[in-house]
Amino acid sequence: MACENGLSFADLCEQHPEICQEFQEDTWCKQERISVSFANLAHKLEAVDSNKFQQLMAYEGYKKCMEHASKIEHIKLKIKQTRRIKNVIQAQDRITEISDATRNSEHPDLLFYHWSHYLDEHALGKFTALEGNALLEKPNRQVNLASFYAKRDPQKTLKILYHALELYQPDETLDSEIFKSIASIFADKKEYKQAYIWSKILHIYSPDDTNITDESLESYIRINGLKGEFLDKVAKTTLNKIIDGKFTSPHT
């Protein structure tokens, strides 16, 4: 793994050993630990709020992975479990530290982070006040905005999620949760054709997602009397437009 300037993880550890030595090394969660290291390097080089947010995301990912690993018993090597628990605690301490340091940040991602993790109403107010602002014109920020409206205004939520899909650049990695949320909204509205189309899009893009299977889609077609072959073509065409960066929001 390498960062944007071509620095490899081995290079990082050689040039910045203090970053790589933060956690006691373990065979588990190596990718997550590498992500933490690169996030810390980026912050060391430029201590801006966007890099602080990336640190939080990296530590959250590492902590989640290590929490799982620490639950695995080692009959002969109990020390491994102890080491993993220490790493979890250390990651949480860093999350708390960075969270405290960014409590008054105006950065959109940090504003939503403080709302979603600490129910900070002041941060939420600042985040929602940015609606329509160019600062929120990124897919992940539109998804965050949609999550706020999800239980308040499903139709507006749908419009925001569509806009999130419009903002993706060609071949950019998509957040498959968007497809899941759109399908759910249509299912709640009993618009079965649209619910199927977006479920099919999810299945095509994320075939390993256990929420949707070929069997469940076939059953959905059968129960609701849908024309599966036609809807499958619509799903594929729609997904291709999203991947190519050519999706436009339908009228909602």
Image: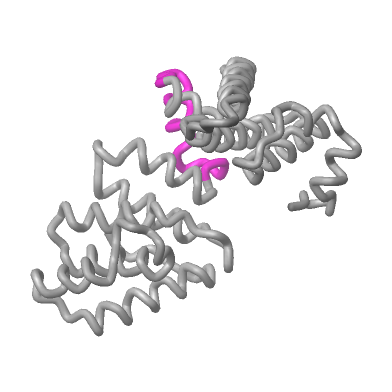
Among all residues in the image, which is located at the extreme right? Answer: 15
Q: Point out residue 206 in the picture as x, y percentages from the top left corner.
A: 42, 63
Q: Is residue 25 above or below residue 244?
A: above
* Up-down relation of residue 171 to residue 59 (above or below): below
Q: How is the image coloured?
A: one colour
| Residue 190 x/y as whole percent | 12, 59
Judge by depth and name the residue closer to the eye, 85 or 229.
Answer: 85
- Foreground of the two, 209 or 109: 209
Res 51 → quadrant: top right
Q: Is residue 187 above or below residue 43?
A: below
Q: Is residue 104 visible?
A: no
Q: Is residue 156 magenta?
A: no
Indicate left or right for 225 with 116 as reference. Answer: left
Give the residue drawn at x 55%, y 59%: 173
Viewer-closest of 229 and 115: 229
Secondary structure of the magenta portion, mostly? helix
**Residue 50 in the image: above or below residue 205:** above
Query: Range of the magenta residues?
Result: 119-136
Q: Nearer the viewer, residue 178 or 29?
A: 29
